[in-house]
Image: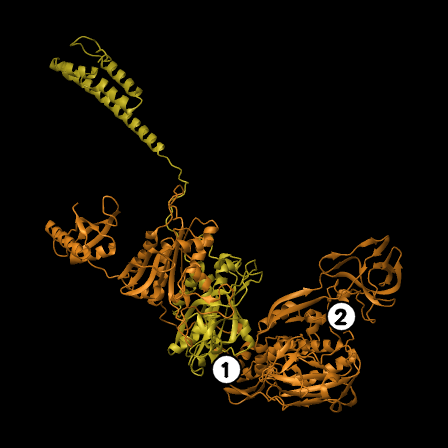
Amino acid sequence: MSNQPAGPGGQPGAEPDLDAIVAAGAAAIAAAGDLEALREVEQQHLARRSPLGEAQRALGAMEPSRRREHGQRVNQARAALQAALSKRREELEAARDAALLEAERIDVTLPGRLRPRGRIHPINRTIDEAVDIFLGLGYKVAEGPEVETDWYNFEALNFAPYHPARSMQDSLQVEGTGPDGSPLVLRTHTSPVQIRTMQAGPPPVYVVIPGRCYRADTPDTTHVPVFHQIEVLAVDEGLTMADLKGTMLAFARAYFGADRQIRLRPSYFPFTEPSAEVDVSCFVCGGRGCRTCHQQGWIELLGCGMVHPNVLRAGGYDPEKVSGFAAGTGMERPYMLRSGLEDMRILNDNDLRWLASV
Amino acid sequence: MRVPLSWLADHVDLGGVSATTLAERLTFAGIEVERVDHVGEDITGVLTARVLEVRRHPGADRLALVTIEAGGEPREVVCGAHNYAPGDVVPWAAPGAKLPGGIEIGRRQVRGVTSDGMLASARELGIFDDHSGILVLPPDTPVGVDLAAEVGLGLRDSVLDVKTAPNRGDLLSMRGIAREAALVLGTELKPLDLSVTESGPPAAELATVEVQDAEGCPLYVARVIEGVEAMRPAPLWMARRLFLYGQRPLGAVVDVTNYLLLDQGQPLHAFDLDLVPGQRIVVRHARQGEKLRTLDGRDRVMDPDDTLITAGDEPLAIAGIIGGETTEVRASTRRVLIESAHFPPESVRRTMHRLGISTEGAQRWARGVDPGGAPGVCDQAARLMTGLAGGTVSGGRLQAGPGVPRRPAIRLDWRRSARRLGTTEDIGFAADQLASVGCEVAVETGATLLATPPSWRFDIEQWADLEEEVARRWGYEHVPMTLPGATGGHLTEEQRLRRRTRDVLSGMGLTEVLTYPFTSQADLDRLELPADDPRRRAMRVRNPLSEERPELRTTMLPGLLEVAARNLSRGVAGVEAYEIGAVFLPQGEGLLPAEPRMLGIVLAGRRPAGRFDERPPPPDFADAKGIVEGLVAALAVQGVRYEAAATAPFHPGRCAAVRLDDRPVGVLGQLHPRVAATLGLPAASFAAELELTPLLEEAPTTIPAHTPSPYPELTFDVAFIVPPGVTAQALEDVLAEAAGELLAGLALFDAYEGEPLPPGHRNLAYRVTLQAPDRTLTDADAAAARERMEQLARERLGATLRTV
């Protein structure tokens, strides 16, 4: 070992200069730039063949009184160097770890790995939400065919043949006739399910009816020929217009927020009487007037009314014994209102990028 | 119906109520006012002026230099029209005036002469559509006043846009709206001027009327006027009012019929009496095949259901719908027969529907016209026509028909109705409200009353109609709010699982789409469905939204594949979409179609990239199958199997029929390369179509939970070489049978085909997991299972176990 430092004092039996040994060791420890160098320093300054090791070995040759006193000093010197070494090792290990972690640094703003992110169509989500409100109010879900007979779609709902009210709903007619002998149509509303539900069993009836409907309309920003409706039908003994109004308020608040108010305007539908349009106070401005409500403070939400006696009869119920109410609306409009969508046609466009964005 | 307040004021004292307030009150009484337009506010600075002198423009022959006076200094304007003379009163747009459309009038040079503003035509003022000359105002018009504000042309007005319900024919006139306005304002209708001055011979000597079809025409009223000039122009105020309804002036006689239709709601018809053979009117059923050329120039073929106005033999008009050409009022007309009849809604609707004609008159008859008004309106027409077109009214009305029967009284159980509405059971309240809308009311007891609806209210037919009348008079805002005691709200199992299906599919990354359920044979041609494929049998829509797709879909595939192609062409990298919806399968005449609920799936383009720097490959068969398997697993449906199939539009070697136990429930596969090419889709496009209901019916409400065995599993691997034609499914079935009840898992981990195996042979390697509920399995169990597997696979499938 050519670089072995010369022992202090040089002569055997002579007392080595422990202060110098510690000073030299401490300097070497401090100078070690990495853990490898530190291991070398440890070899040179703390191993058996280091000056300190020599000093320790030299104790054996000393007389006992001197040995005790001198041994104590040697141990102190070793402890000092060990402490310095440990401290330096910790420093160097920390530096090494830090460098390693730094080298592993990544750009955390890069995008994550894509997990499947499919979507349910916004209209179906809207329908589910509305249905859930009525489930909570104690209603069951009723469904029915999309190809209907003229009788179920119109006559049973109090639209007389050729009656001008029929022009409110231009139907798509399907070739052929149904079991009741009347021509087939694609249903223009979900209301035929009212009749089918009543025919299926005795009152009471509390159902919510979602479904796809068809009208011979030209598409524009607020109309599409294939659309979705939801309606409710309640028939029971002693149901009143107050029940209808209360139910409308409950729905409006569940869907548009607890602070909403409603108002009823008289209207006309062949299958209800009295009939009304329900306005809900604007959920954006609270009724002060804004863009969403066209400065009216109110938004037209749905149509409703007490079930017309002719409709109860068509369903096989006795209008002298039971009464009922019905309410319904297209689902596209409430979705547009809440989402801010301005063109209804995009709901039928099936643009996957748009669908993924909503 | 557009209702100018100035016109409404002819019929009811509006008492200074604002248009907005009136609109709101009407709306909350059930007469929906959709909009209030304030018209004419864009006209300012137009004054009435008297023409003093007309000279030729010194620099232009075709221009006139007109001196006018409008209450101040005489002014000089240049004018291109020449239809006025000194003394006439004309509209003068002074410098600084504004005309409709934001046009501002200045003082400008015209060929070297300064024109001080301009004279205006009716069209330039937006009064009505006439630009043939300057609007010459009536001679008694005051000079020097603001035309828009002070001359009674209704130029500056508020117009209510009233949406009338289809059962309220009575609201299709000023008189009808005025009746409702009087109710909400608490005032009275103004009386009508029904005076008429008769002279000359009695009408009965000039013409006869007879009704043979009393059902189609229970009342026929007519008057005869003589010596008219039918084409005299209607006065400005009438022209203006007709213009608001999009009607052009057609001469005083016809204009009066049109005007009274709007004003009173009674459609009238004017015949040139001299052109009516024998001056005889007979109302009768049409004869089969009878022809009439109507005023729109079309030849109409009649049906015995139709009611005709005839001269006995020759048809003259279709009752209530449209007149005929031969007796049309024209310039030469001197004698006019004014028809003011009553045609019941049902018969007019039928004929209207059959012929596809919808005139202003027919629309009113179809909704119901007040029969009580017919004689009075006939008198008004006679007075107005002779006042405007000259001539005299012959003595007396002509009348035929049994008359319109009085409406039957309706009994209202007010106690019940009051409860339904949540209002007072005081019958006097109901009686008052009904009387206010014109019903004759007789209170029977404390609880019921009899009400006879007024002749103009065709919509009041039963007690519910009376109930509604009271409710709307009372005001819906007074109805209290309660909630009924509905209970037991829940989804059916199928409804719940349908939602679950959407959740699962969307959770797997598919996007739900909703396509129109229309298709065509051409769509099915593109899918290369054979001619006898049951999906070729589709129901047709008579009036389809698009002639290209006139049929109801029998398969979800065309719509979904179109969505895929369109999205790819728009630059979407990969399509993974599904749709749940009905298809329509004809069941034969007299039956509704079956509407099974289908699930369609499409995969095309690239698979979704996991990370931004990855370029994923296109999907393969396993992607499509994995989705179906994943759904089946999520629903925990047992017994679903896949078998090789060759069904259009799929690749014959890459198509699987999906079976639930023994029932086919769907198909999945790669599109046939030719079909993919036809549709503009990549070759690696995949689709699936499943009938959803049977799958959902087989899904357990709750997945049965088994208790895991406390004893360890034993696993070993087996590999078999199977000859051509043996499917993995077949081998798995055999291995499962061989392993018996101990089998806890059988998972394919390798499938290899190629050297050194003989051609068509495959090596299929499985990890087998065995477990017993009651003991720890040993190597002997594994050896026994392996031995049985080797034996069964060899015997049944000709497969050989590879020694691992």
In the picture as drawn, the residue positioned furthest to the front comes out as B759
Chosen colour scheme: by chain
Chain B palette colour: orange
Dot 2 and dot 1 within a common chain = yes
> Chain letter for yellow?
A
Q: Is residue A2 left or right of residue B32?
A: left
Q: Chain letter for mark 1, please.
A: B
* Residue A305 screen position, x and y as percent: 49, 74
Which quadrant of the figure has residue B327?
bottom right
Name the residue that disc number 2 marks: B152
In the picture as drawn, the residue positioned furthest to the top comes out as A11
Name the residue that disc number 1 marks: B425
Residue type at mark 1: give it: Glu
For the C terminus of chain B, the quadrant is top left
Which is more foreground, mark 2 or mark 1?
2
Q: In the image, what residue occupies the spot 78% across and 56% down? A: B105
Which mark is first along the chain, 1 or 2?
2
Residue type at mark 2: give it: Gly
**Where B59 falls versus B544 (above or below)?**
above
Q: In the image, what residue occupies the spot 68% across and 69% down? A: B246
